Amino acid sequence: MFQLEWPLVLLLIPLPLLVYLALPSSPLQQAALRVPVIDDFRLGEMQADEVKPRRWRQWLGLLAWLLLVLAASRPQWLGESIAIPVSGRDLMLAVDLSDSMRTGDFKIGDQQVNRLQATKRVASKFIERRRGDRLGLILFGTQAYLQAPLTFDSTTVNRLLQESAIGLAGERTAIGDAIGLAIKRLDLESDNSRVLILMTDGANTAGEVTPLKAAQLAADRGLRIYTIGIGADEQIETTWFGIRRTNPSAQLDEKTLRTIAGLSGGQYFRARDSAELEHIYGLLDELEPLPRDTQNLRPIQALFMWPLAMTLLLVAILVTPRIWRRL
């Protein structure tokens, strides 16, 4: 179905005629008497030969104006109605970007990757499955930032997650501030279910709000928090003195993460490798199932660029000969 977003713009079509009528007449048209000479007849013959191309230019100019007005009225094509599921749930992802996320203790296939790369890979699949949810994205380190407000556009949220980088929000970890920002940005006045999934590999080392205080406030506001502790329990390193076994997750504050989840009615999960991380997101699908309600939407495709392109082409046709003659 074709429609115009701003149909009143079409009222500008007679504007060139109104301008022409409003302009004062030329001095030659105002002259009462003019003595003809032989050159006038020669000039008249030359003008007669130029009338036809001049009229063509006028018609092209008029067509260009009509196309410009049409483009300004924002023509659109409405597609067929599409039924999409609507869950009535607001889901916010909070991802840790502190310096410790550089630790390469995860594997995707046979490739060794750091914690953030593994998180992006698995969270991306989770986001793609959230049809009908309003999704948001918080990135936190020393500070917490809202990277994407709540939206049904899961593709954009996924892209913003993939573009995130370690250290973008600082090198330390402000878990409490991330929870506080989620409380602030989620629509607490709506009837939607509100969920926060918080992923971190460390302990709260920055921020103005303590994690437990923020978790209690979330519980009072009806925000359920699922926390995910990221990082392997053991990593083998080869040094000059032989093989050394280390615990790369020594700084992970599992006790606080369990308490945060418990206070808000959520759960705590431990992801030691990519397989466990994928399993956790599968469990979150079961814990937060999608209802079967649907909403009908009609996709809109903008068409203004076509008449605008034709307008520019016609203007180029009108202007190019004059420029060429001057050159």
Image (cartoon, helix red, strand yellow):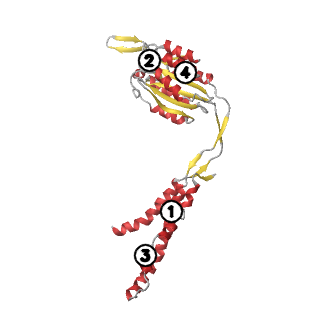
Residue under pointer 3: 26
Q: In the image, 171: left or right of 138?
A: left
Q: Quote the CA–CA distance across marks 1 and 3.
A: 24 Å
Label ID, residue 195: none
Residue under pointer 2: 204
Residue under pointer 1: 65
Q: In the image, 241: left or right of 306?
A: left
Q: Provide the secondary structure element on which disc 2 rests.
A: loop
- x and y, in percent, of residue 2 in the image: 62, 53
Q: Provide the secondary structure element on which disc 3 rests.
A: loop
* Residue 108 in sight from this viewpoint: no
Residue under pointer 4: 218
User: Pointer 1 and pointer 4: residues touching (CB < 8 Å)?
Assistant: no
Amino acid on which the number 3 mark rests in the picture? Ser
Amino acid on which the number 4 mark rests in the picture? Ala
230 or 171, nearer to the observer: 171
- The vertical placement of 20 against 45, above or below, is above
Q: Residues within 10 Å of mark 3 (few under 14, many from 20)?
A: few
